Amino acid sequence: MEGVAFASFTSFATKSLLFSSLSPSSIITRSQKSRKNISPKPFVTLLDYGAGNVRSLRNAIRYLGFKIEDVRTPKDILNAGRLIFPGVGAFASAMDVLVKTGMDEALCTYIRNDRPFLGICLGLQLLFEYSEENGPVKGLGLIPGVVGRFNSSNGFRVHHIGWNALQIAKDSEILDEIGDRHDYFVHSYRAIPSDDNKEWVSSTCNYGYDFIASIRRGNVHGVQFHPEKSGDVGLSVLRRFLHPNSRGTKRPTQGKASKLAKRVIACLDFRTNDKGDLVVTKGDQYDVREQTKENEVRNLGKPVELSGHYYKDGADEVSFLNITGFRDFPLGDLPMLQVLRHASQNVFVPLTVGGGIRDFTDANGRYYSSLEVASEYFRSGADKISIGTDAVYAAEEYLKTKVKTGKSSLEQISRVYGNQAVVVSIDPRPNGEVYAWYQCTVNGGREGRPIGAYELAKAVEELRAGEILLNCIDCDGQGKGFDIDLINLISDAVSIPVIASSGAGAVKHFSEVFTKTNASAALAAGIFHRKEVPIQSVKGHLLKEGIEVRI
Ligand code: 1PR
């Protein structure tokens, strides 16, 4: 991913100095000699240079029955039987680490020798000559061509986030089960197809214009999308790479994917009930207690089970919101981290986690930065984190001072993990009789703030939010449809994707939000938890209405 500076790179580079006395060329010579004696291994080697979250990929590889051996030295690359390189972070920082550690040469040798390789996302981009990301920055130069940024001049939002279709250019056995189905992309830079790299390109994708979605030459593969987050289709890509002998025949083409799909997201609000159990709950206008004498927290099921169910039913993403995170210390909430760890072992679509992300000092006086809190969420399996309350305070401060301090949770987390990994959740409540405005709230709707949803959205975009989750307290849990005016107000104000939330009560509400607004995704909770409508029926309806969704 892009736009990222990495504290963790530095520490990895320092560790790597342990083997820096061994020159890359001497390493290569020795391992080339010994390679003849290497037998095929029942594991895959992973080049994780410590720049971010590759837990999802690890989970997917393990799910497919493979063991993982991590690269520690350039020699491990040369000795690998099968190597996966999930590039994470910014192009320049990644190249910097590769060069400092001598892994650049090892990688080039490995790939030039046509050894089994799969680069993912930045792991594909680094194979090219140059990237414009903070550059031009030199890449490994194995494939002719350049990596450039998407631009919004053609009306497309700069991040390409979501499920898109591939146009297969040539046979690439690992793509053979994709057919006409969508894969999950998240990036704002892309490799540009040209005559010079034509022979490498195995598929392209269109987002305003064509870009390289995958490359293949011999045993060397690279994909811009994330197979580990692309559901069954993505798992088939990994499986075909990991088990080349069991690839079998090409599957008949399925699906009708042609462009970026609208996303349907299942949301699990959860909190601890009065007995101390972590439960999925869902309120009416944010009140999650039953209207009974006991006034207990509404219990709609167990988070891990429900997330697995929604994944199988076709959710394009699953969101977990710890709705009382504002009052408890989220890292003290070990069951919640366990939920995430377990859910991410079996759910291979993006997981977003929110609730309580802020700087915090615990009872013993130990200070935790919001970045540490977010990092723990990422380590536990989150692909994106969502910030509510703290983003409101950051936006208020920014609007008051006009200074980006770089210290807000929003700025810190997007600097380290990339802004595609940072969602801002807005909880507005319509206010005012004559001049209506959408007043932002904090602490789960408990406190109104002197800032409107429009101003907040614009400010958090400037502070590097990557996406907006747009709730509406009045519509929440009512089943009467999304607030179309609010969604239009916000999605027209920003150039980052907007997720419409609150109020879905029937399949027609999903088609309405996608035909009347520019929302990139629709999120719902109650309608799914109460089992009124399965996600597949929502998608069936959207397809019938001519709205492209992933099936
Ligand atoms: O403020 O950073 O600690 O984050 C808290 C997060 O928890 C925020 O994202 C906030 O929206 C959420 N939250 C806080 N209290 C509640 C509550 O319900 N009492 N849930 C709450 C808000 C999230 C929605 C919901 C949809 C769809 N709900 O995404 O799931 O409104 O519901 P529906 O389809 O049934 O209408 P912080």
Image (spheres, rainbow, N blue to C red):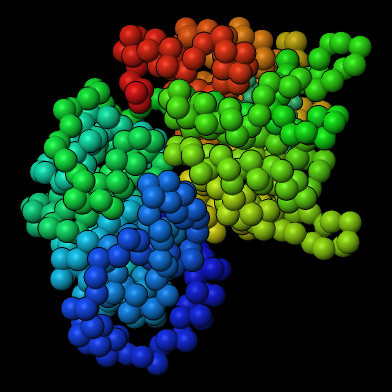
* Rendered location of residue 185, percent (x, y): 36, 41
Residue 136 in the image: above or below residue 230: below
Horizontal placement of 210 versus 529: left or right? left
Residue 493 in the image: above or below residue 2: above
* Rendered location of residue 511, percent (x, y): 43, 12
Location of the N terminus by quadrant is bottom left
* Rendered location of residue 349, percent (x, y): 45, 37
Horizontal placement of 357 versus 501: left or right? right
Please name the residue shown 76% across and 20% down the image. 298
Can residue 275 be seen here? The reply is yes
Q: Nearer the viewer, residue 216 or 155?
A: 216
* Rendered location of residue 439, percent (x, y): 72, 25
Please name the residue shown 88% across and 61% down the image. 364
Horizontal placement of 347 versus 361: left or right? left
Residue 310 in the image: above or below residue 546: below
Location of the C terminus by quadrant is top left
Residue 157 image-quadrant placement: top left
Please name the residue shown 53% across and 39% down the image. 351
Residue 100 image-quadrant placement: bottom left
Q: Nearer the viewer, residue 260 or 398?
A: 260
Please name the residue shown 28% across and 74% down the image. 79
Q: Quadrant of ligand 1?
A: top right
Can residue 188 be seen here? The reply is no
